[in-house]
Amino acid sequence: NNEFKELDANLTSKDPLKFEDTKKYSDRLKDVMDKTKLKDAIRTGVGKSKGKDLVVSCMDFAFIGGSMGAVVGEKIARAIDYSIKHKIPFVMISKSGGARMMEAAMSLMQLAKTSAKLAQLAEEQIPYISLCTDPTTGGTTASYAMLGDINIGEPGALIGFAGPRIVRDTTGKDLPEGFQTSEFLLEHGFLDFIAHRKELKNKINLYLDLIQNQPIR
């Protein structure tokens, strides 16, 4: 019924580096919070899907391109801790341009942090399903987005590390047709399947039941 309990709703980013490009990072944060009514680029929560508990972390591209900073990494880590404590499957919905440049090394540390947390989840034999939406790029792809027990892509989604233009400019070579689309990744073994958004509820619950050897709902 679209009801869920939000986890760690009040975590907000700081500006320890006093970063400034075309505007101060602190001002950028304030502006985007006012515009989006979000505290950062991710919301985490727990609720029921087809009668069973599920922890979901969902990124929002409207908040600085869905970039991953310290708060995003911390909220994912805490959501995984909640999954482990309560023995609940974890679903990650990625929509991100990658690491947040304004937080420099602290942003890059989230790749290792989230990957380590997912290793703990795997040790507890709790299922993790990763959904890659358009776009899923940069540090997000290099960490949690590709570590699911099942990796799902949405049709036509851009999924990769560096974008096609950067790869082309760096290598000086033309790229294969459809390079870095979910269809290309599926063909080359990086995704398990592609599903339209309206199919996801049934698909995700099906695979959770299969992984846990439970009766199919």
Image (spheres, rainbow, N blue to C red):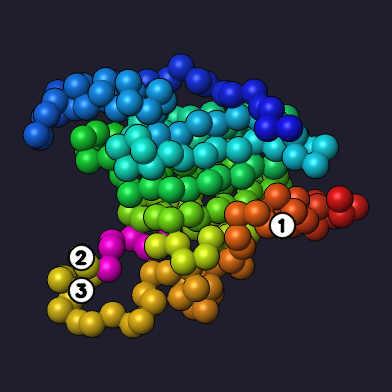
**Circle 2 is placed at which residue position?**
166
Instruction: Name the residue located 69 percent from the left edge and 27 percent from the top edge.
Output: 3
Q: Earlier in the sequence, mark 1 or mark 2?
A: 2
Q: Name the spot of residue 64 as percent of width and height, x first.
A: 30, 37
Residue 16 lies in the magenta stretch: no
Give the answer, above or below, for where 34 lies relative to 196. above
Check disc 2: other Cα within 10 Å, few if <14, some if 14-19, many if 20+: few
Amino acid residing under circle 3: Arg
Q: Amino acid at mark 1?
A: Lys
Q: Is residue 73 visible?
A: no
Question: Residue 10 shows which numbered tag?
Answer: none
Tell me if residue 163 is in the magenta stretch: yes
Segment colored magenta: 159-164
Position of 56 with respect to 69 (left or right) is right
User: Where residue 150 appears, x then y in whole percent?
Assistant: 63, 59
Q: Identify the secondary structure beneath mark 1.
A: helix
Residue in front for this viewpoint, 87 or 140: 140
Labelled pair 3, 2 in contact (Cβ < 8 Å): yes
Label 3 packing within 10 angstroms: few (<14), some (14-19), many (20+) = few
* Front residue of 75 and 134: 134
Question: Taking 193 as reference, is 160 left or right?
Answer: left
Q: Which mark is drawn over residue 168?
A: 3
